[in-house]
């Protein structure tokens, strides 16, 4: 219900107004609350908890009489033992615990600010919400507000996307990707490739192994996509676009990830005339494709890449509008990536190194 109330405020209150979350002064809530758009927290909690001999930490609350060791490395925790605190008189003990609680609260606020600046707030929320089942519940509920969160979530971040559990599949970056995929025009045939190192197009093995389809193949134009977690499917042209090179996930898939991939492939079967898949994918996801086919000949021109990135970044048709002339493409000598695009000696776009975004020069 906390998530419901706060997210309703996000929907209906102007984003420029600061939001104070009354009655929420526990540091384990800060990251989640900030992710929901809260700016200010209750200022009395540190003292209320101290009055009750309870010590706050970002991962939970400790009652003083249950502690054998102090929980952090603030001055109070370094200079006292729980036994010492217990023998003090009430006021002195309360002030020391309050000092610890305040220290922990400010440290967490700083950590949240750093995470915002790094673009890793949701990774912090994910960590914090594993400390208590009710927080995990709140986090999962928050992830249902993808449409609303997407409005406020930057499309490019300084830090990589880390897969930290099935909840990551519902992160707004994944949601956004699947909405934006619709911006790319569909080809008749689809080739699904197993994931390799990133960026994928630079690590495609010489020998792709065997490929299978559900029916004899009759199409001659192909879209190439890599199957990977957490984004599911990544068009090869986008492999250098944020966050498709900037994400990490474990190579062992959990059940949710397997189901996620399976359901995506099922949907693709309705959208494409023909799909061919690597032997590895066929087996791993129980696809049951029976016809052995020629391994695909992977073609990816620089223009294809630019057009696809522009469509994906700006909207369908942008690629053709932007990159239609006689293009001269300048690549970085160091990385081999496209840096500048000229049309008839005029610079029309550069590609940002950090995230692969197209920066048009008009
Ligand atoms: Zn402490």
Image (cartoon, helix red, strand yellow):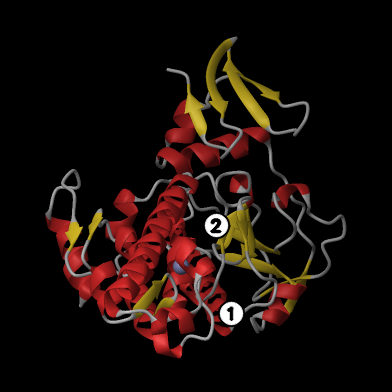
For this view, does 306 lie left or right of residue 204?
left
Residue occupying image coordinates x 56% and y 31% = 352
How many neighbours does mark 1 have within 10 angstroms: few (below 14), some (14-19), or many (20 or more)? some
Can residue 27 be seen here?
A: no
- Give the mark nearest the N terminus, 2 or 1: 2
Say which of 69 and 345 sits in front: 69
Say which of 192 and 339 sits in front: 339
| Number of numbered discs visible in the structure rendering | 2
Residue occupying image coordinates x 40% and y 66% = 100
The residue sitting at the bottom extreme is 66
Residue that mark 1 sits on: 258
Residue occupying image coordinates x 55% and y 15% = 347
Q: Of the numbered discs in the image, which one, if any, rests on residue 161?
A: 2
Up/down of 63 relative to 304, above or below: below
**Mark 2–mark 1 distance (CA, rounded to whole Å):** 19 Å
How many neighbours does mark 2 have within 10 angstroms: few (below 14), some (14-19), or many (20 or more)? many
């Amino acid at each position: 219900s906390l998530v419901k109330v706060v997210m309703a405020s996000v929907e209906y209150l102007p984003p420029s107004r600061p939001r104070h979350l009354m009655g929420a002064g526990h540091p384990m809530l800060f990251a989640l609350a900030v992710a929901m758009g809260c700016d200010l927290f209750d200022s009395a909690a540190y003292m209320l908890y101290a009055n009750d001999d309870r010590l706050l930490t970002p991962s939970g609350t400790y009652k003083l009489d249950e502690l054998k060791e102090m929980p952090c490395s603030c001055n109070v925790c370094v200079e006292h033992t729980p036994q010492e605190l217990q023998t003090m008189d009430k006021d002195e003990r309360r002030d020391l615990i309050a000092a610890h609680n305040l220290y922990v609260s400010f440290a967490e606020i700083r950590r949240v600010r750093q995470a915002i600046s790094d673009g890793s707030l949701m990774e912090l929320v994910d960590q914090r919400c594993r400390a208590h089942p009710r927080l995990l519940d709140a986090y999962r509920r928050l992830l249902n507000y993808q449409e609303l969160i997407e409005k406020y979530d930057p499309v490019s971040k300084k830090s990589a996307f880390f897969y930290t559990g099935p909840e990551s599949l519902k992160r707004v970056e994944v949601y956004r990707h699947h909405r934006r995929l619709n911006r790319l025009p569909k080809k008749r045939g689809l080739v699904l490739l197993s994931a390799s190192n990133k960026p994928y197009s630079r690590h495609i093995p010489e020998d792709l192994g065997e490929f299978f389809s559900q029916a004899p193949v009759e199409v001659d134009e192909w879209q190439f996509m890599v199957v990977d977690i957490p984004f599911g499917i990544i068009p090869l042209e986008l492999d250098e676009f944020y966050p498709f090179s900037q994400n990490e996930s474990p190579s062992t898939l959990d059940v949710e990830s397997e189901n996620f991939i399976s359901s995506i492939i099922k949907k693709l079967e309705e959208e494409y005339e023909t799909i061919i898949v690597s032997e590895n994918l066929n087996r791993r996801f129980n696809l049951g494709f029976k016809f052995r086919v020629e391994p695909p000949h992977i073609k990816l021109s620089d223009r294809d890449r630019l057009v696809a990135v522009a469509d994906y970044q700006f909207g369908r048709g942008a690629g053709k509008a932007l990159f239609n002339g006689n293009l001269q493409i300048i690549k970085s000598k160091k990385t081999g990536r496209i840096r500048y695009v000229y049309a008839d000696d005029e610079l029309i776009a550069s590609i940002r190194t950090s995230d692969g975004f197209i920066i048009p020069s008009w």
